[in-house]
Amino acid sequence: MTNHSKSIHLLQSPLELPCGAVLKNRMAKSPMSDSLSNGMGDATEAQIRLYERWAEGGTALSYIGEVQGDPRYPEKPGNLTLGQDSDQQALQSLTRRATINNAHLWAQLGHAGALSHLPISQPKGPSALHLAGLQCEGMSINEVRQLPDMFAKTALQAQLMGFSGVQIHAGHGFLLSQFLSPLFNHRTDSYGGSIASRCKIIIEIINEVRHAVGPSFPVGIRINSTDQLEGGLTELDALEAIRLLDQTSVDLIDISGGTYFPGAKASSDNASAGPYFLDFARRAKELTSISLSVTGGFKTRSQAIDALASGAVDVVGLGRAMALNPQLANTWLTEEGGDPEFPKFASNPPGGITAWYTMRLTALGEDKEKSFDMDLPTAISVYEARDEERCITWQEKFAHLYT
């Protein structure tokens, strides 16, 4: 076997999770807010086709980002929801078509908290915030204590609908990330203060989710390595959180970083040429036996192979790279390989790159990527107009929950 073949073998080798589930290779399509649900929380044909294409492309695991169990606190009106009034036929079509070729599809279970989309939400977080561009109410102790049951019911619904696993979203500044951050968690009860106390609700959610779905169903978590905000979650506290997670039944820890708070620098807009969080992952590896995935900044096959070879990570999370080439996993498993060509933009208006990639996902879901040619201002305009329309249908469907 040549050195090149050995390198490909690192990407190709299966990974058995503690629950017994097997990922067929080491490449995951990382969670992205695809914004392809229909404005009523239901799956659409374009969304179904998008995840089917990643499964066709050889991806071992795809996450469907920002799946909401409580429609009162969505990240965007294009989020998928899981509840009694969901379109079950559409969900089952999604999970059936996105799990071909032994691919996994995990629902990323979220609650946007203080970042809940204002037109369709009355945001609540761990503590009341009154900041420029960001205001929310604080959650009561009873509301906090209801979270594990909500996450567990949503996870069970995911299991019943055919998802092959779930990921609890505790990153990027959404609710559970807010609990971890001393900048946004000022609670004086048992859910605030030390990092162990700030982790408490997450541990309770993991335990309740595991109880609901049983021992053989994958349960992952996404957690920040740092908020990248002054006064926010530090790497030292994040490492302590990893140590606490090691004592739970979690199957895979996905490491990311940064937040979507107004004015915060996005990790995905980092000028760095390489992966963002590998140094943190190396330190985290010393604290846990749970498999680690790292998401952010992987642009080439050699970067992915080097990360796996270093022993710092067990799974490589690929977002924008797989938006550019949905066949990327299969491509990287061939001798010749081939890396995606990332677009270069003359300017970067706020939110422009995110909007462009979101609209690129729409083109993939409609099998129209060959004719996709949007500049950033157009992408922002189309993306925002679509969200405005969906806000109306979201309010109509879920109005009864706000009374």
Image: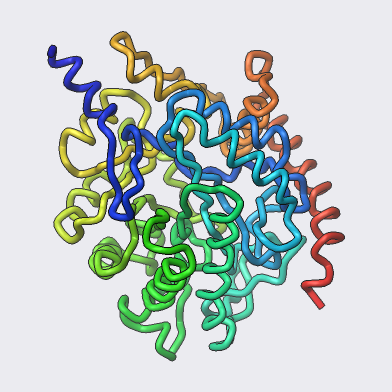
Q: In this figure, which colouring scheme has been used for the structure?
A: rainbow
Q: Nearer the viewer, residue 311 or 51?
A: 51
Residue 58's image quarter? top left
Residue 117's image quarter? bottom right
Residue 92's image quarter? top right
Residue 282 appears in view:
yes
Q: Residue drawn 25% across and 64% down?
A: 246
Q: Nearer the viewer, residue 111 or 133?
A: 111
Q: Residue drawn 70% across and 32% down?
A: 46
Above or below, 14 relative to 169? above
From the viewer's perspective, is 401 left or right of 82? Answer: right
Query: For the C terminus, which image quadrant?
Result: bottom right
Above or below, 296 relative to 193? above
Q: Nearer the viewer, residue 248 or 322?
A: 248
Query: For the N terminus, which image quadrant?
Result: top left
Q: Residue drawn 46% across and 85% down?
A: 187
Residue 183 appears in view:
no
From the viewer's perspective, is 126 left or right of 44? Answer: left
Q: Position of residue 12 (x, y in %)?
A: 28, 27
- Which residue reaches farthest bottom? 189
Q: Position of residue 192 (x, y in %)?
A: 40, 83
Q: Position of residue 309 (x, y in %)?
A: 17, 33
- Which residue reaches farthest top? 336
Q: Residue drawn 83% across and 47% down?
A: 389
How many badges with numbers are in the image?
Answer: 0
Q: Position of residue 240 (x, y in %)?
A: 24, 68
